[in-house]
Amino acid sequence: MAKLHEGLKDLTIKFLHLDPPLQITNGTRRERRTNGRGYRYALTSWKKFMKVAQIKVCDQVHFSFDENEQVLTIERVVRYVNRSN
């Protein structure tokens, strides 16, 4: 199991696709990759993030990330449409 590093720098998330737009601060974490080369980064409170952003499984998310300011901007969410024959 990879060792987690909790409590890294907080990340500002802007939800521009919501009306009115919303901004929250979320924590981040990292874990060493299983091959030992570098780290993987993730948001903490992932479930809360998905609920606030109103993102469902299989939705397409358009976003940008400003590394200098540590701001993740969710610009658009395209809802998944199940097209069965």
Image (cartoon, rainbow, N blue to C red):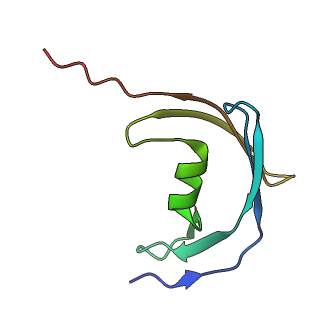
Q: Position of residue 41 (x, y in %)?
A: 59, 64
For image coordinates 44% across by 81% down, the residue present is 2
Q: Position of residue 13 (x, y in %)?
A: 73, 50
Compared with 73, 35 (above or below) is: below
User: In the figure, is residue 64 to the left or right of 36?
Assistant: right
Compared with 67, 27 (above or below) is: below
Q: Nearer the viewer, residue 35 or 62?
A: 62
Q: Give the quadrant of residue 80.
A: top left
Q: In the rendered picture of this protein, how many numbered marks are placed on residues?
A: 0
Q: Nearer the viewer, residue 63 or 80?
A: 80
Compared with 16, 51 (above or below) is: below
Q: Give the quadrant of residue 56.
A: top left
For image coordinates 47% across by 72% down, the residue present is 33
For image coordinates 68% across by 33% down, the residue present is 18
Pick the quarter of the image with the N terminus.
Answer: bottom left
Q: Nearer the viewer, residue 25 or 70?
A: 25
Furthest toward the right, the residue is 69
Q: Give the quadrant of residue 75.
A: top right
For image coordinates 86% across by 52% down, the residue present is 68
Pick the quarter of the image with the C terminus.
Answer: top left
User: In the figure, is residue 8 to the left or right of 77?
Assistant: right
Furthest toward the top, the residue is 85
Q: Position of residue 34 (x, y in %)?
A: 41, 74
Q: Position of residue 82 (x, y in %)?
A: 27, 24
